[in-house]
Structures are given as C-alpha cells and as structure tokens.
Image (tube, rainbow, N blue to C red):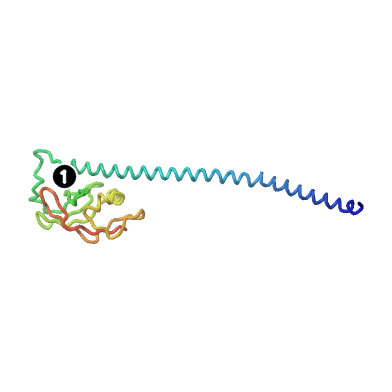
Amino acid sequence: MDYFLAILPAIIIIFLILVLAYLTQTSLRSKYIKPMEERIDELEKVLKQRDKDLRDLTTALMALQTEVEKMADDAMSFLKQQPVGAPAINAPTEILTDFYMSTPNKDGSFNMASYSETFRPSVSIYHFVPFNKTQAEFEFESDEQGMRDALNFSKSYIEPVCDEENDVTPDSKQIKTIDKGLVEYVNGQWVVVKKAIIRYE
C-alpha cells in the first residue's frame, strides 16, 4: 500500500502529460491540419473542374477546326463556279508575271478565282513565278495571319500541294520552303505536277 501511494503522484503526472499531449494534438489538428486538409480537398475539386473544362475546350476546338475546314472547302467550291460572262481567266494568255493564289483544293490544284497579281493580306498563301503561259514554280509565302492559319490547318493549306520535311508542332511559328514546287495550267486551274517541300520552324 505504501508503495502504491509512493508511485501514485508519478502515475497522476504521467496521466496528466498524456491528457495534455492528446489535447495539444487535438488542438493542433483542429487549428492547422484540418484547415489544410479542407484546403487540399478544395484544390482537388478545382483541378478536377479545370481538367473537365480543358477536355470540353479541346473537344470544342476540334469541332471548330472541322467546321473551318468544311467552310474552306465550301468556299473553294463556290469560287470554282465562274459567273457567265466573266473575264477570260480560263485562258491565261498573258500571265507572265508573278502572281499569288489562296488555299489549294484537296486534289492539289489552285482555282483561278483566287488568282491575284498583288499580294492580298490574309488571303494570299502561295507565290507563283511563271516560266511561260502554262508552267510555273511556286512556294509558300504569306503574312502573319496566313502563316497562323496554315499552321493550324496544315491538312487543308499545306498537305495537298507540299511535302512536309517534319511534323508541325504547337511550337512551330514559321513555314519555310526548302524546294519550290511546279504547276501546270490545265482546264482553268493550276495543277501541281511536283509538290513543294516545306519545313516547319
């Protein structure tokens, strides 16, 4: 009994230390850890929402690209329909100076409806230098907007008339002609007989 009474104060002190440690841990958790956990949960919810928004934006962008390419095809189809009595652009008897054309057709040809002897901002995409009345060489040549459109829609702007030396990437800023292509005038269109070679930079 005397022994028990002797160690009783030590037991009480240990008990009080344990209680104090528990209370301190609970207080720290309530004050610091719990708010941090709640903040982490909030951040995880925000990240999940941003991932969803990014996926939705990517889907919308792809749909927009498809729609723009369709609009480009429709525009080219419309340009092919020459009005009755239009100037005789079907016979390029005097085309001996440099000229410019816009987006090519899918079959690798250029419609004369986009022909221009002067550079047209955002419209002119390719520069042509004629050898004679029915043959010419060409290269990619456009302004900043045309360059940006060609990089974003290379399938429509580049692939029909150019061989690509490398793949276009999100970091690509320029399109450089490595080897000029050749075209021949056939039935009212300039038709590619040799593709140009370009490199994305």
Q: In this view, which residue lies farthest toward the front?
A: 1
Foreground residue among 19 and 198: 19
Image coordinates of residue 164 in percent, x first then y, are: 26, 58
Image coordinates of residue 4 in percent, x first then y, are: 88, 52
From this view, report whether residue 167 is shown above or below residue 28. Answer: below
Foreground residue among 37 and 146: 37
The residue located at (90%, 54%) in the rendering is 3
The residue located at (29%, 42%) in the rendering is 67
The residue located at (40%, 42%) in the rendering is 56
From this view, report whether residue 6 is shown above or below residue 59. Answer: below
Question: Which residue, given by chain and number where applicable, does mark 1 sit on?
Answer: 113
Left or right, 44 with respect to 181, comes to: right
Q: In this view, which residue lies farthest toward the right?
A: 2
User: In the rendered image, which quarter contains the C terminus?
Assistant: bottom left
The residue located at (91%, 51%) in the rendering is 1
Image label count: 1
- Characterize the local packing of mark 1: few (<14), some (14-19) or many (20 or more) Cα atoms within 10 angstroms: some
Image coordinates of residue 47 in percent, x first then y, are: 49, 46
Q: Amino acid at mark 1?
A: Ala
Q: In this view, which residue lies farthest toward the top?
A: 84
Q: Secondary structure at mark 1?
A: helix
Image coordinates of residue 5 in percent, x first then y, are: 89, 51
Left or right, 76 with respect to 18, comes to: left
Left or right, 109 with respect to 16, comes to: left
The quarter of the displayed image where residue 63 is located:
top left
The quarter of the displayed image where residue 195 is located:
bottom left
